[in-house]
Image (cartoon, rainbow, N blue to C red):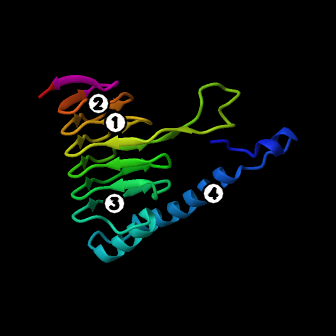
Amino acid sequence: MLIHDPELQARGERVLGVEFRAMSERVLRVTELTSRLNVLPFDDEAGKAALLEQILGAPLPARVTIYPPFYTDHGLRLDLAERVFINQGCTFLDYAGIRLGEGVMVGPKATFITMGHPVDPDERRQFLTGAPIDVAENVWIGAGATILPGVSIGRDAVVAAGTIVADDVPAASLVAGPKGTVRRRW
């Protein structure tokens, strides 16, 4: 995604592009909504449900549990199936799309990132890059894990606490360590 309007930039003007501007406006709106969500009393189920519906653009599916604080930058591209559990302090940067399948459990302070910038210094301030994250059914994401753009995690897999997942995770496997190495399969 281009950050600046290419025609105006060619003339030396740094004007945000239409798509980037729309995303930026949504980020500001959702940041305001999540800041309100994160200060509600824990037992205010109706208040939490109403704010989450505005953040996600739809009511929560059956038996989804989200413990605040909860952070997302877009919200409309976070697809939660039934029986998803999200513990405290999790972050979902979902502009390119995140799907959590039925029965997924996410430990505290896990982070899902779908967008980034090119590594090339000349392109870094010009573009955003991104790819969706897909987490299949019955996956367990440990505390503090980081899931990077474009990753798919197979059914029944476990991502150990603190793992950085940059590559796809096979079904029915345990990945651990700083680069998410498969340690065991069942």
Marks 4 and 3 in Cβ contact (< 8 Å): no
Question: Gap in Å between the C-alphas at discs 1 and 3?
Answer: 25 Å
Q: Toward which corner of the image does residue 181 lie, by quadrant?
A: top left
Which residue in the structure is indicated by mark 4? 22
| Foreground: disc 4 or disc 3 | 4
Question: Gap in Å between the C-alphas at discs 3 and 2?
Answer: 27 Å
Instruction: Tell me if residue 164 comes above or below residue 25 in the rendering.
Output: above
Number of residues whose C-alpha sits closer than 10 Å to that of mark 2, classed few (under 14), some (14–19) or many (20 or more): many
Number of residues whose C-alpha sits closer than 10 Å to that of mark 1, classed few (under 14), some (14–19) or many (20 or more): many
Which residue in the structure is indicated by mark 2? 169
Residue pictured at 36% horizontal, 58% vertical = 69
Precedes in sequence: disc 1 or disc 3: 3
Q: Indicate whether residue 179 is drawn in magenta.
A: yes
Dot 2: element: loop
Amino acid type indicated by mark 3 = Pro
Dot 3: element: loop
Look at the image and give the residue range highlighted in magenta. Answer: 176-184
Which residue in the structure is indicated by mark 3? 68
Q: Indicate whether residue 109 is drawn in magenta.
A: no
In the image, 87 versus 159, the foreground residue is 159
Dot 1: element: strand
Question: Gap in Å between the C-alphas at discs 1 and 4?
Answer: 27 Å
Residue pictured at 34% horizontal, 46% vertical = 109
Which residue in the structure is indicated by mark 1? 152
Q: Toward which corner of the image does residue 144 lie, by quadrant?
A: top left
Marks 3 and 2 in Cβ contact (< 8 Å): no
Precedes in sequence: disc 4 or disc 3: 4
Question: Gap in Å between the C-alphas at discs 4 and 2?
Answer: 33 Å
Amino acid type indicated by mark 4 = Ala
Residue pictured at 64% horizontal, 25% vertical = 120
